[in-house]
Amino acid sequence: METIELDDIIEILQDVEEDVDYENETALVDNRILDSFDILSIISALNDEFDVSIPAKDVIPENFNSAAAMRDLIQRLVDED
């Protein structure tokens, strides 16, 4: 079972938008720090990096408001495989 590290998620996020405090920010979507294009880029990068497919039902703000929420989402998808 692969353990997804928060640092791995943050590294991907910094490729999309550099000047954000991903370790502490908890409203990336709600505060419009990330826009829909950013989310699509992040989904693509996460799918590629962790060999998962994020289903449309999981593309909701709660899963993308923080790096920790994204890590939890990816961890769940990896564990389900």
Image: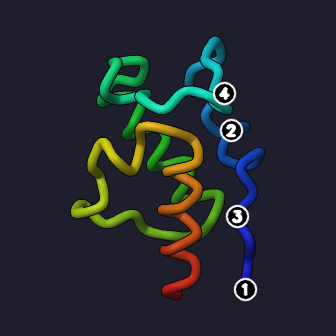
Q: Which residue is mark 3?
A: 4
Q: Which residue is mark 4?
A: 14
Residue drawn 49% across the image and 86% down it = 80
Residue 44 placement (x, y as % from top left): 47, 49
Of pointers 1 and 2, the one earlier in the residue sequence: 1
Q: Which residue is mark 1?
A: 1
Residue drawn 73% across the image and 77% down it = 2
Amino acid type assigned to the residue bearing label 2 in the image? Ile
**Residue 17, picture quadrant:** top right
Q: Give me the C-alpha separation between circle 4 and circle 2.
A: 6 Å
Residue 16 located left or right of residue 36 = right
Residue drawn 67% across the image and 32% down it = 23
Residue drawn 41% across the image and 43% down it = 64
Of pointers 1 and 4, the one earlier in the residue sequence: 1
Q: Which residue is mark 2?
A: 10
Residue 20 placement (x, y as % from top left): 61, 17
State yes or no: discs 1 and 4 in contact (Cβ < 8 Å). Answer: no
Which colour assignment does the render follow?
A: rainbow
State yes or no: discs 4 and 2 in contact (Cβ < 8 Å). Answer: yes
Residue 23 located left or right of residue 73 = right
